[in-house]
Image (tube, rainbow, N blue to C red):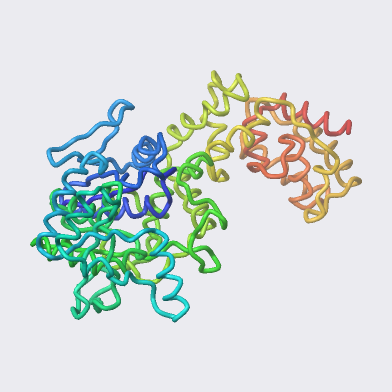
Amino acid sequence: MRTRFAPSPTGFLHVGGLRTALYAYLMAKQTKGEFILRIEDTDQTRSIPGAVENILKTLHWAGINPDEGVVLEQGTVSSKGVKGPYIQSQRIEIYRKYADELIKKGAAYRCFCSTERLEQMRTQQQARKEAPMYDRLCCSLAKEEVEKKVKAGKPHVIRMLIPRSEKITFEDDIRGLLTFMGHTVDDQVLLKSDGFPTYHLAHVIDDHLMDIDIVIRGEEWLSSLPKHLLLFQNLGWKPPRYAHVPLLLNKDKTKLSKREGTVAVEEYISKGYLPEAFINFLALLGWNPGTTDEIFPLDGLIENFSLERVQKAGAVFDTEKLDWLEGQWIRRIPLKEFAQRIQPCVSEKFKAAANDRDFSKKASLIQERLTFLPEAAEMMSFFYKEPAVTMELLVNEKQKVNEKTAAEVIPALIETLSGVNEKEWTEETLKSALLKLADEKGFSKGQILWPLRAALTGLPYSPGAFEVASALGKKTVLARLESALAR
């Protein structure tokens, strides 16, 4: 199947847009087809420089690379394929040609109404509690009068003529059988007064000429579907399949918006989310595999995805679930690769980390605790600098460690660990020696381990005391305990 993603270059790519692109990509790959990227920039006033590059870089980050259309090659935006141009502002003459054809067929007409008249008309309709719709004043103009106005250069738009008595039915791949009555559909503007098409005309023409088999888009376009189906019908073309995916919602079930939270993919990239985790998360927003499985790499999504299991109801954008998936994907990274990926950010803050032969071993202590790769520098800080240990950190009410207990435990730790042979300085040896100390002195496990871990790391959360002590080595451990005792 040939599928497409057709964003407008109006800013950073929206998370909902990336989900739409993902679903279209999965359908293409599942059927050994092509995924096309088209840029819909006919609203020139909203187009932002650099937006196309951002869209392409975001898709590349997510592993969703177009097979055809607008692509990014060696950092430069270019086109790939024989059905272009793939940027709508470069296809204006094509749209005008088909708009004229619709007029000749009696399926569209020229409208010369001013903005002021249209606003007055809508105000009066709202006062009468009627749905705002064009009143077709220009539809009754004589052919000669229309030609005269056009020749005089009077500004106008081209509207489609909706058959008011017609019933339009269609089988949506997600919504099932849909029915629309013609009298509820407005005479949509197809070509604006500046000669640029609206989305309605442009996407119908492009999807036909580019041989698109299925259009996957947000449910906000459902009300426009009858207009699009009529355009295909009036142009004598078979429409593609349509699948309208559910909206993304905030936790309070309102539509996901900038006012409620982060909606640009760029911001999630900046926060350090892994593309594997983010794509996994987006796939599950509105789709379920029919199993208890929740971890899906991209090839797993290609194998398992189906529109039949996409729900109709809106999907809640739950960042807690996203963070959980991020953690799961962090754990899946092989240790060697994990160490390689975090070493640059740790080395940026601590130069000694760049040539640390034991970096992988140290990195292994934080992999289970990390949510974002950039957190690694802070979590590994105690390996490369003397921690700032405070009395507030050494005491812990939950572990029943007060100042008096800490003052008793730390000297006992120094005495016990001084007696451990440096050649036998391992996690198991340290564990055995410290648990024996707790038993002999009548301390709980927490009363022994909390002061030790706090003294060694200076952090409220860190890997376990045995692992940290083993990785730091005897000399460093004793020095830090002496420093803590002095406090």
Whether residue 1 is visible here, answered yes or no, is: no
Q: x and y percent of residue 485 in the render?
A: 86, 33
Above/below status of 126 relative to 206? below
In the image, residue 250 sits, relative to residue 396, either above or below, namely below
Residue visible at 19% across and 79% down? 167
Image side of residue 461 versus residue 235, left or right = right
Q: Residue at x 43, y 43 (%)?
A: 11
Q: Residue furthest right?
A: 404
Question: Which image quadrant is residue 145 in?
Answer: bottom left
Count of marks placed on residues:
0
Q: Position of residue 103 (x, y in %)?
A: 14, 60
Look at the image and tell me whether residue 271 can be seen.
yes
Q: Nearer the viewer, residue 397 or 64?
A: 64
437 or 347: which is nearer to us?
Answer: 347
Front residue (pair 309, 233): 233
- Measured as percent of width and height from the top left, residue 369 is found at 57, 45
Residue at 11% in and 56% down: 101
- Front-lying residue, 121 or 25: 121
Q: Position of residue 320 (x, y in %)?
A: 54, 57
Q: Quadrant of the C terminus?
A: top right
Horizontally, residue 135 falls left or right of residue 457, namely left
Q: Is residue 446 left or right of residue 337?
A: right
